[in-house]
């Protein structure tokens, strides 16, 4: 099956998510009063200087016009990544939704005896690998629940089965929350777990489980799972082993601007440390909008889903604050197709990929398509005035031809 084939049943963009044509022009034509409040930050951005914590708090202020903020973020975005709009052909594997933890924001987890609970076994996993290969995927994104009856060996086998049978797939697997759980199961160190997973075929780590680092918030939404120090320890060990990883933030629930800027500064400080030591580090930051449907946090606190305006502000602030992280991703599954497209003018340079079989955010109420075709993704990027560039997980260019695909050089990112 061609990787460019459309799945007509599932890749339709729903009404209300129609593409926004040429977001860059939209910014330029908006009424945009000159704002003295941004003058000091504008000077820093134009000079390539680092923004401070207080600068970040200022950017969070509603007094800062969003179009002007987007314009500044776009300067940094184009300075780093030119006009490229990156995407990949990927699929998700959520091998179980049964989970020992009860995070209040999660709509995906299930109890063992819940009718919606599931636990994939070897044949199911292999079938998913075959489907990914047949559809030209270069990446499988693997995360899921922490099944209290599953031994560590099962989690390892998920990776080894796929790697041994489908070696062309890059396996991006296990958040620090899962790695921490594996360490508890085995009574081994995080480093031992990562080394063992790498031997099994692990290629990189996703960025999930970060949520909000500040203990004031983390203690309220996910008090029992790995804390922020454990999260950073996992990424630090991964980076020293040469494994790249992503990083995230879950915003739009009970956190305040102070907590969001604190979160970004912690990510930036970690990246500084990894760069100073000459290790691989974070390659992409993904801001994740909270979906309040079907979970305890949203229902009890009566939280509304973040607006598109807030989504764009968080995207732009991230691009301005995270000067040492190369890529900012607009995850269309969570943002919606139209907002993700517009994000390409607000600091984002990556729109993720085809994303087959994503369950976690759809369970939380996401109304985005279950997958998008390559043609749709390329069209969205071109309509935003960007140049579509297919990349693999580690940001090598992907060249496709009649005989399949091959990796090219790593994309160039300016400092």
Image: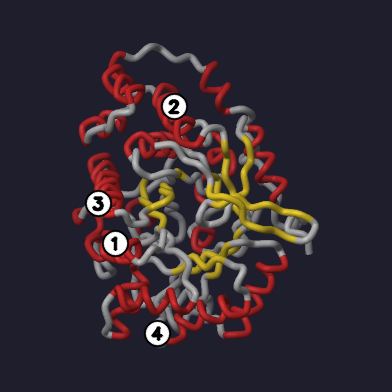
Q: Which of marks 2 and 4 is in front?
A: 2
- For the residues marked 1 and 4, what is the alpha-carbon distance in whole angstroms? 22 Å
Residue 355 point in image, percent of width and height: 59, 58
- Asked which secondary structure carries label 1, the reply is helix
Residue 320 point in image, percent of width and height: 36, 34
- For the residues marked 3 and 4, what is the alpha-carbon distance in whole angstroms? 31 Å
Q: Can residue 397 be seen in this view?
A: yes
The quadrant the N terminus occupies is bottom right
What residue is shown at x 53% (from left), y 79% (from top)? Answer: 118
Towards the viewer: 222 or 249: 249
What residue is shown at x 52% (from left), y 33% (from top)? Answer: 82
Density class for disc 2 (Cα within 10 Å; few <14, some 14-19, many ≥20) is some
Residues at discs 1 and 4 in contact (Cβ within 8 Å): no
The quadrant the C terminus occupies is top left
What residue is shown at x 63% (from left), y 84% (from top)? Answer: 123
Residues at discs 1 and 3 in contact (Cβ within 8 Å): yes
Instruction: Indicate left or right for 411 with 328 as reference.
Output: right
* Mark closer to the chain start, 1 or 3: 1
- Asked which secondary structure carries label 2, the reply is helix
Q: Which of marks 3 and 2 is in front?
A: 3
Residue on which disc 2 sits: 75
Residue 39, quarter of the rendered image: top left
Residue on which disc 3 sits: 273
Q: Is residue 378 above or below residue 293?
A: above
- For the residues marked 3 and 2, what is the alpha-carbon distance in whole angstroms? 26 Å
Q: Residue 236 carries which label?
A: 1
* Mark closer to the chain start, 3 or 2: 2
Q: Can residue 255 be seen in this view?
A: no
Instruction: Indicate left or right for 360 with 397 as reference.
Output: left
What residue is shown at x 47% (from left), y 71% (from top)? Answer: 202
């Amino acid at each position: 099956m061609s990787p460019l084939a459309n799945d007509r049943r599932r890749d339709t963009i729903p009404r209300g998510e129609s593409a926004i044509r040429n977001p860059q022009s939209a910014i330029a034509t908006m009424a945009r009063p000159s704002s003295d409040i941004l003058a000091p930050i504008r000077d820093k951005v134009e000079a390539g200087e680092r923004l401070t914590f207080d600068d970040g708090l200022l950017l969070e202020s509603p007094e800062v016009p969003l179009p002007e903020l987007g314009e500044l973020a776009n300067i940094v975005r184009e300075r780093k990544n030119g006009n490229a709009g990156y995407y990949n052909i990927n699929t998700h594997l959520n091998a179980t939704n049964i989970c020992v933890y009860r995070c209040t924001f999660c709509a995906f987890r299930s109890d063992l005896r819940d009718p919606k609970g599931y636990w994939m076994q070897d044949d199911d996993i292999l079938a998913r690998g075959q489907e990914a290969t047949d559809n030209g995927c270069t990446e499988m994104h693997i995360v899921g629940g922490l099944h209290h009856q599953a031994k560590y060996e099962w989690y390892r086998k998920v990776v080894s089965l796929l790697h041994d049978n489908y070696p062309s797939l890059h396996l991006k697997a296990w958040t620090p929350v899962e790695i921490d759980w594996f360490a508890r199961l085995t009574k081994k160190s995080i480093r031992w777990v990562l080394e063992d997973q790498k031997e099994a075929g692990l290629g990189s780590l996703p960025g999930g489980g970060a949520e909000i680092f500040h203990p004031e918030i983390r203690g309220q939404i996910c008090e029992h799972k790995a804390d922020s120090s454990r999260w950073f320890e996992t990424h630090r060990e991964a980076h020293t082993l040469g494994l790249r990883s992503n990083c995230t933030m879950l915003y739009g629930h009970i956190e305040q601007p102070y907590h969001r800027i604190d979160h970004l500064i912690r990510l930036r400080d970690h990246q500084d440390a990894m760069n100073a030591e000459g290790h691989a580090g974070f390659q992409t930051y993904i801001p994740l909008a909270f979906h309040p449907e079907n979970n305890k946090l949203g229902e009890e606190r009566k939280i509304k889903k973040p607006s598109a305006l807030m989504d764009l502000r968080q995207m732009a602030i991230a691009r301005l604050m995270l000067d040492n992280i190369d890529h900012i991703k607009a995850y269309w599954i969570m943002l919606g197709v139209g907002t993700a497209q517009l994000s390409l003018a607000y600091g984002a340079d990556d729109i993720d990929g085809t994303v087959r079989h994503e369950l976690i955010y759809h369970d939380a109420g996401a109304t985005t398509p279950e997958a998008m075709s390559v043609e749709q993704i390329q069209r969205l990027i071109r309509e935003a005035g960007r140049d579509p560039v297919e990349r693999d997980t580690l940001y090598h260019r992907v060249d496709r031809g009649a005989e399949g695909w091959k990796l090219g050089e790593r994309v160039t990112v300016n400092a």
